[in-house]
């Protein structure tokens, strides 16, 4: 009788007894361990022989050459912005008014669903098992985004935008907070979708709403996502309006605390670092976004040293968890390490932890996911470590950060279920989704009224070539 292949064995509803080459625990990689997965959780983690004796009726799936490690957590995403990713390339900061608001405003239910599922697909391919969505501006029920995440098979911290300052037709803080309460209750029992509140930037919410969302989130054990101290322009506007920087203003009105997930936080004074540490506020450190459209790099190594809670976020830039961890370390090295002679910049383990357990804590799911540990959700990856990049390991955490990439991910599990196998969904058609997204994206971008400060790279090249040719003709005509 033919033995089922690995994919078939791993697709079993469980329980699953997995015996990989190594397991990545918080303290580092360990050989000779097995994990028992049942009912969506890690039921046991221990020596292979010990778990086989304890569960004689469950055949172990042996996975030599595979590392079982926690799934990555994307602590900051905008799922319904996936149609416009390249529209941000080469653009100055604060593009939300010119690109993201009009783009999301052009989405209907179908296109919002497909955009969100496309983003989830990319995230899963890149090893993310959880994404924190900072809220859509599309004029659709947020359940559209929740459905896309569920159907894709990814865990989602789902933000409801609670902006009410200078918003035409706003029902005021009372209406916004009523909707926030309903949103928090709506997903209380959902296995994959976890409710969150969001205010785009501090100036987008009234003081009553900023206070109220902080209170509601704290009571519900959820987080409020706010873009804070991301760009120079927003810091200056806050100084003019309040005499305080955005983070200082949130502290002044009592909105800092463990319930706040401050997105970006790139422009921080020493006092603001102290405020984050003293209040237990969490940060999403988004290094690729800083490089592509930011004004600065968040001082994440200093945050780690001071015990400030933080995770890593893509901000929708690209969905590869390994490249995100590498960017996190690389940005610290360029922005801070080179100038101070710091050759370690937190070492590999800091960035792996921020990409997994630290991210889960930052988005409010630290008691549910983020590590391979008994009782936590079975959100994990199988990574091929018998590749040229990783085959002879001297320091696996560093190698995963510096040399890992999504091509090495064999399988992605969320809530104990196999969701991706070699980059393809196991129970839905990924290529068909991409085809559908291409059609809808062209239509949405065409009607969005997006304003770019720069032409596309192809158009820019044509302009430069034309200018060079014109200059050459002028020089020839002048007889130089």
Image (cartoon, helix red, strand yellow):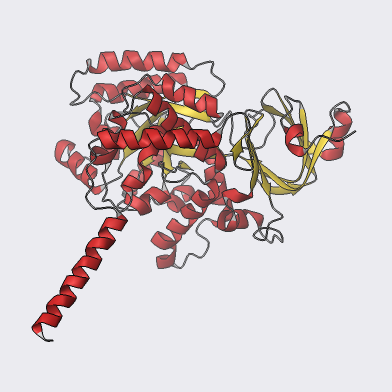
> Quarter of the image containing the N terminus?
top right
- Residue 33 lies in what quarter of the image? top right
Q: Compare residues 477 and 346 and report the one nearer the observer.
A: 477
- Residue beneath the point at 42% across and 38% down: 76
- Residue 477 lies in what quarter of the image? bottom left
- What is the tally of numbered marks visible in this picture? 0
Residue 303 in picture, x, y percent from top left: 44, 48
Q: Compare residues 309 and 56 and report the one nearer the observer.
A: 56
- Residue 54 lies in what quarter of the image? top right
**Whether residue 172 is visible:** yes
Residue 343 in picture, x, y percent from top left: 51, 65
Judged from this view, the residue extending furthest toward the bottom is 480
Residue 217 against residue 84 in the figure, above or below = above
Left or right: residue 37 versus residue 206 is right
Residue 400 against residue 223 in the figure, above or below = below
Residue 96 in picture, x, y percent from top left: 27, 39
- Residue beneath the point at 70% across and 59% down: 393
**Whether residue 297 is visible:** no
Q: Compare residues 298 and 8 and report the one nearer the observer.
A: 8
Residue 402 in picture, x, y percent from top left: 56, 58
Left or right: residue 416 versus residue 175 is right
> Quarter of the image containing the C terminus?
bottom left
Left or right: residue 74 versus residue 51 is left
- Residue beneath the point at 43% across and 52% down: 302
Residue 216 against residue 116 in the figure, above or below = above
């Amino acid at each position: 009788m033919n033995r089922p292949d690995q994919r078939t064995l791993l697709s079993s509803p469980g329980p699953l007894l997995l015996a990989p080459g190594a397991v990545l625990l918080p303290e580092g990689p360990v050989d000779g361990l097995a994990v028992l997965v049942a009912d969506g959780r890690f039921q046991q983690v221990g020596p292979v022989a010990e778990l086989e004796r304890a569960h004689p009726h469950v055949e172990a799936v042996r996975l030599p050459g595979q590392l079982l490690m926690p799934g990555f957590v994307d602590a900051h995403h905008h799922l319904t912005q996936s149609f416009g990713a390249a529209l941000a390339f080469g653009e100055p900061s604060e593009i939300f008014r010119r690109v993201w608001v009009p783009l999301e405003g052009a989405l209907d239910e179908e296109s919002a669903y497909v955009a969100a599922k496309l983003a989830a697909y990319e995230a899963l391919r890149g090893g993310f098992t959880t994404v924190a969505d900072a809220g859509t501006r599309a004029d659709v029920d947020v359940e559209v985004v929740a459905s896309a995440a569920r159907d894709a098979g990814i865990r989602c911290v789902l933000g409801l935008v609670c902006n009410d300052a200078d918003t035409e037709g706003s029902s005021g803080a009372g209406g916004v907070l009523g909707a926030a309460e309903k949103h928090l209750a709506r997903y209380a029992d959902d296995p994959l979708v976890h409710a969150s509140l969001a205010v785009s930037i501090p100036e987008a919410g009234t003081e009553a709403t900023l206070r109220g969302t902080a209170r509601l989130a704290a009571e519900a054990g959820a987080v409020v996502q706010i873009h804070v101290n991301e760009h120079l322009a927003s810091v200056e506007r806050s100084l003019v309006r309040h005499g305080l920087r955005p983070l200082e203003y949130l502290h002044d009105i009592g909105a800092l605390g463990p319930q706040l997930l401050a997105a970006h936080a790139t422009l921080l004074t020493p006092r603001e670092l102290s405020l984050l540490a003293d209040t237990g506020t969490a940060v999403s450190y988004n290094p690729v976004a800083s490089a592509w459209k930011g004004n600065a790099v968040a001082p994440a190594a200093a945050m780690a040293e001071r015990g400030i809670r933080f995770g890593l976020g893509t901000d929708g830039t690209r969905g590869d968890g390994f490249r995100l961890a590498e960017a996190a370390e690389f940005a610290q090295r360029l922005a801070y390490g080179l100038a101070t002679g710091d050759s370690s910049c937190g070492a590999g383990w800091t960035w792996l932890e921020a990409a997994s357990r630290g991210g889960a804590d930052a988005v409010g799911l630290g008691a549910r996911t983020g590590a391979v540990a008994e009782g936590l959700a079975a959100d994990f990856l199988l990574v091929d470590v018998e590749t040229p990049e990783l085959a002879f390991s001297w320091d696996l955490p560093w190698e995963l950060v510096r040399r890992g990439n999504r091509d090495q991910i064999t399988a992605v599990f969320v809530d104990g279920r196999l969701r991706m196998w070699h980059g393809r969904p196991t129970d839905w058609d990924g290529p068909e989704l991409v085809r559908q997204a291409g059609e809808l994206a062209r239509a949405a971008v065409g009607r969005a009224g997006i304003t770019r400060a720069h032409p596309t790279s192809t158009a820019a090249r044509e302009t430069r070539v034309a200018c060079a040719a014109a200059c050459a003709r002028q020089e020839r005509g002048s007889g130089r």
